[in-house]
Image (cartoon, helix red, strand yellow):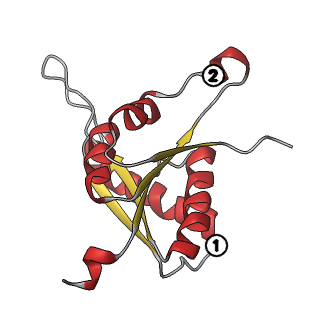
Amino acid sequence: MDQEAFTRKIVVGVDGSRASIEALKKARTIAVPLGAQVVAMACWSFPQVYGGYVAMGVEDYEKEAQGILEESLSRAFGPVVPEDVTSRLLCGPPRDLLIDASRDADMVVVGRRGHGGFAGLLLGSVSSACVAHAHCPVLVVHAPEEG
């Protein structure tokens, strides 16, 4: 069998939020002692079009998502991204693409954007979908506290 079949993989959902940056850092912390590859995954899609209306600047969604992914990697790891971290930019709904990626991953790591108090007890739609439907363990990482 080829070596890639034995390489552990941790998939991280990246959207540019503080929680997803923290998820990237946490995933790498877990990956290093396991010899795992971290796959930073960002998803983008075109906005829904209603009644023939087409939003201006639609062609820039992929480019903007790529910029968010690159900035997130830079914020998490500095100017040099570690060799065990790769990135993927995919077109489609994040929850579906992350769940699909979980089929051949050892773990999925996602951030949770909380608002504190009672709202802080609830997970977002993407993290909830991953927790409920992923094919591997899921780690939900909170954004670091301010101050």
- Quadrant position of residue 57: top left
Image depth: mark 2 or mark 1 in front: 2
Density class for disc 2 (Cα within 10 Å; few <14, some 14-19, many ≥20) is few
| Visible residue check, residue 68 | yes
Quarter of the picture containing the C terminus is: top right
The image shows residue 72 at horizontal and vertical percentages of 54, 59
Element carrying mark 2: helix
Q: Nearer the viewer, residue 33 or 80?
A: 33
Amino acid of disc 2:
Leu
**Disc 2 and disc 1: Cα gap in Å?**
31 Å
Residue position marked by numbered label 2 in the rendering: 121
Q: Is residue 68 left or right of residue 32?
A: left
| Visible residue check, residue 44 | no
- Who's the residue at 49% across and 28% down the image? 124
Q: Nearer the viewer, residue 120 or 44?
A: 120
Vertical placement of 87 versus 121: above or below?
below
The image shows residue 52 at horizontal and vertical percentages of 12, 22
Vertical placement of 53 versus 146: above or below?
above
The image shows residue 10 at horizontal and vertical percentages of 43, 61
- Who's the residue at 61% across and 58% down the image? 26
Amino acid of disc 1:
Gly
- Quadrant position of residue 79: bottom right
**Tags 2 and 1 touching, CB below 8 Å:** no
Disc sitting over residue 97 in the figure: none
The image shows residue 103 at horizontal and vertical percentages of 26, 52
Residue position marked by numbered label 1 in the rendering: 78
Quarter of the picture containing the N terminus is: bottom left
Q: Is residue 119 left or right of residue 55?
A: right
